[in-house]
Structure formats: C-alpha cells, structure tokens
Image (cartoon, helix red, strand yellow):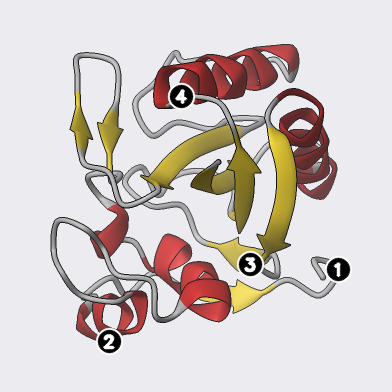
Amino acid sequence: MNFVIFSLGSNMGNRLAYLNLAIKGLENQLGDLLIKSNVFETEAWGNKAQTSFLNQVVVFQTNKKPEACLNILQSIEKEQQRKRNEHWGPRTLDIDILFFNQEIINTHRLIIPHPFLEKRLFVLLPLSQILADFVHPKLQKNILQLLQECKDNTQVEKHINGI
C-alpha cells in the first residue's frame, strides 16, 4: 500500500463544500482516508488579487501508482468545474500531491515532492498539525523544521467551521 499526502484548496463558491467533495471523491476513487488537518483560511499566494482560500492537508492509503493518483485528482477537479485559465488564479478546487511515500518523482506530468511546498505556509501549517515529524525525502528535514525555516508571511488562520 502507498501513503499519499494531498493539499486541498478552494477560493470560489462554497469553499468548504468543495474541500469536502474532494475528500469524498478521493475516498470513492483512491482509497482510505487516514487523517486530515483542520481547515485553514489563507490569503491568496502568488496572485494576491483574489479571494482568500480554504486549505487542508489529507493523507490517504492507496494501492494506486502516482500517475493514477494524478489522473484521479484531475478528474475530481474537473467534476468541480476547475478551470486552468490563469496561473495561480481563482479556482473551485485545487488538489496537489505533496508526497507519495518517500519517493522522488520528476516526469513531464508529475513532480513529487511538490516543488514549492517548503515555501508555502498554507501547506506547512496544516501538514505540521498532522505529520510534524514526516521527513521531506529531498530536503532531509522534517515538516516542523521546514515550517520554522519558512519565510512565507501570508496570513494563515484556522477556519472556524473547518474541523
């Protein structure tokens, strides 16, 4: 079995509902949900001229390979009317694979570990809540160390309804 860590985000429509739909879709198509972080409200990263995001990190156990996981998450995004019109633009749903076991993957379709995760507070904060000791296979630092070293100063707060 494989251990896959995803980052979920939404800043359009009913953001919390989109995160829940992502989790349900992953449960239906991928495997077992092992743990999930709280939901965090996050100001937009990259393109700041947009509505704030709700973000969450979830961990699944699956027998699927990385490419199959990517296909599944992209189909879930598409079902939720995800449009890829603008880099770092608004979206109903964004699902990223952060880690797949301790593997390092670099293909034309998929880079794992996610190449920006150590620079993003909105990923590191929920990740540290559930997997503080997990070691990044490329950087050889645990999530708590990466969080302490992160220079991102975007505002990230626990969302009241996102338990």
Vertical placement of 147 versus 11: above or below?
below
The answer to whether residue 134 is left or right of residue 76 is: left
* Mark 1: amino acid: Asn
Image quarter of the N terminus = top right
Identify the residue under disc 1: 161
Residue at image position (29%, 24%) is: 110
Numbered disc 2: secondary structure: helix
* Mark 4: amino acid: Lys
Cα gap from disc 4 to disc 3, whole angstroms? 29 Å
Vertical placement of 27 versus 54: above or below?
above
Mark 2 vs mark 1, foreground winner is: 2
* Mark 2: amino acid: Gln
Comes first in the chain, label 4 or label 3: 3
Q: Residue furthest front?
A: 1
Residue 82 shows up from this direction:
no
Mark 2 vs mark 4, foreground winner is: 4
Numbered disc 3: secondary structure: strand
Identify the residue under disc 3: 40
Comes first in the chain, label 1 or label 4: 4
Residue at image position (70%, 57%) is: 34
Residues packed near mark 3 inside 10 Å, few (<14), some (14 to 19) or many (20 plus): many
Identify the residue under disc 2: 148
Image quarter of the C terminus = bottom right
When asked about the image quadrant of residue 87, the answer is top left
Cα gap from disc 2 to disc 1, whole angstroms? 26 Å
Identify the residue under disc 4: 65
